[in-house]
Amino acid sequence: MAKILVTGASGGIGAAISRVLAARGITVVLHYSKGQEAAEATRQTLNGQGHSILQADLTDPSAIGRLWQEASAGEPVDAVVNNAGIFPNHAPLSTEFEDWKAAWQKTLTTNLLGPAYLSHFAARAMAGQGGGRIVNISSRGAYRGEPTAPAYAASKAGLNAMSQSLAKALAPKGVYVFVVAPGWVATERVAKSVKDPAVLADQPLGRVATPEEVAEVVSFCALDAPASLTGAILDVNGASYLRS
């Protein structure tokens, strides 16, 4: 039975990913930063046995190392889903410099350096065990920009580039790297925003993606995607932003 570590798994997209993976017989390690009760509540909803929750501050490199050691204890980790991320608003013309600086530092540390550090531990372990998979959750914001949260867009663009670099470096060792890039997703955190007429006007489907739809694509990458898809960035935005 495979074991997969999902970061930011206490709710939203991470919880949906955990449920989809568990329904396929995977043992899930659910990471959380602060929401222990929510993480445990999510764990209780998962099919099967053996799922666990682990806490780590992904802005702390030593905590990330500890997270990997605890997650990989016993059975090895077969795949990692770097889902945890933050989206602080810091519009350039209305944000004072100290707040601007803090937003950039925290966003890049959480959204880019955290996945980079965890991927380092995962890549080395997976290369030694004959292969594995890393799935990074990006955003359409990496391409279209985020005018009220430029650090978020920059962090996701960096995540895309990092993922493609890792895909090239790790393919010879059987470690495959994929990126899933959603647009708006109907999570509890943005429940009001996704009903905004201005948001819906940008959605050819007439609605935004569900967490389960994103989770299905992540599950495909973590379990089913052919090796030749390594390095791919898969858009899950209902044609709200198209690139070619």
Image: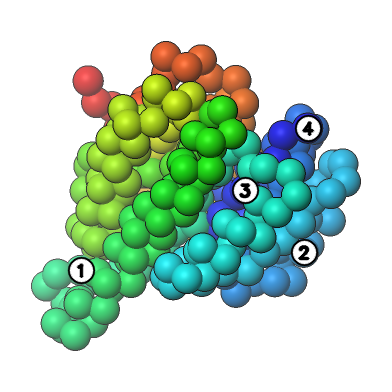
Mark on residue 1? 4
Residue found at x 40% / y 22%: 172
Number of on-image labels: 4
Q: Earlier in the sequence, mark 1 or mark 2?
A: 2
User: Under tag 2, what secondary structure?
Assistant: helix
Instruction: Work out how far the residue at label 3 is from the one at label 4, CA to CA, in angstroms.
Output: 13 Å
Give the residue pinned by disc 2: 40
Q: Amino acid at mark 3?
A: Leu
**How crowded is the residue under tag 3: few (<14 C-alpha within 10 Å), some, or many (20+)?**
many
Give the residue pinned by disc 3: 5
Instruction: Work out how far the residue at label 4 is from the one at label 2, CA to CA, in angstroms.
Output: 22 Å
**How crowded is the residue under tag 2: few (<14 C-alpha within 10 Å), some, or many (20+)?**
some
Q: Earlier in the sequence, mark 4 or mark 2?
A: 4
- Residue 171, quarter of picture: top left
Give the residue pinned by disc 1: 91
Where residue 231 sits: x, y (%)? 36, 27
Cβ atoms under marks 3 and 4 closer than 8 Å: no
Mark yes or no: residue 186 visible.
Answer: no
Q: Is residue 28 left or right of residue 99?
A: right
Q: Amino acid at mark 1?
A: Ala
Residue found at x 79% / y 51%: 51
Where residue 157 sits: x, y (%)? 25, 45
**How crowded is the residue under tag 4: few (<14 C-alpha within 10 Å), some, or many (20+)?**
few
Q: Is residue 228 left or right of residue 31?
A: left
The quarter in which the C terminus is drawn is top left
